[in-house]
Amino acid sequence: MYAKQKLEGISDLYSSPTGGAGKIFIASENICLLIKAGEKFELLSANKIDDDFHASPVIAGNKLILRGIKSLYCFEE
């Protein structure tokens, strides 16, 4: 596993990682990481967002919902 993998761009993490559909979402200060779930670490994307996230990401169907300090975000495929 990759339990000790360094996640670039994340210094403090207040929310819990959320997983679904073979992916793991991690939201922190100004960044949301998308990691492929599995035995080998694979960062799929790192998206900078001008907000801080203390709430865990939520997956609803094919939507990713993030509650930031400033705004509520919804991303869809």
Image (cartoon, rainbow, N blue to C red):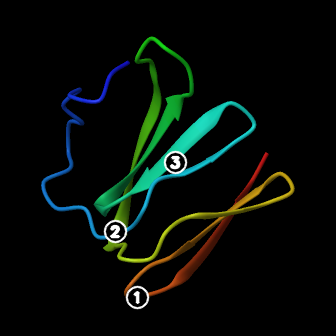
29 w.r.t. 37: above or below: below
Q: Position of residue 31 (x, y in %)?
A: 34, 54
Quadrant holding the N terminus? top left
First in residue order: circle 3 vs circle 2: 3
Mark 3 vs mark 2, foreground winner is 3
* Mark 1 lies on residue: 70
Question: What residue did someone put label 3 on?
Answer: 25
From mark 3 to mark 1, how far is it between C-alphas? 19 Å
In the picture, measured across the screen, residue 6 lies left or right of residue 58, that is: left
Q: Residue at (40%, 88%) from the top-left corner?
A: 70
Q: Which kind of residue does numbered mark 2 sit on?
A: Asp
Seen from this angle, which residue lies furthest right? 61
**Please, what secondary structure does the residue beneath circle 2 have?**
strand
Q: Position of residue 8 (x, y in %)?
A: 20, 36
Tell whether 40 sits left or right of 12. right
Q: Amino acid at mark 3?
A: Phe
CB of mark 3 within 8 Å of CB of mark 2? no
Whichever of labels 2 and 1 marks the residue nearer the N terminus, that label is 2
Helix or strand or loop: what does disc 1 sit on? loop
Residue 50 is tagged as: 2
Mark 3: secondary structure: strand
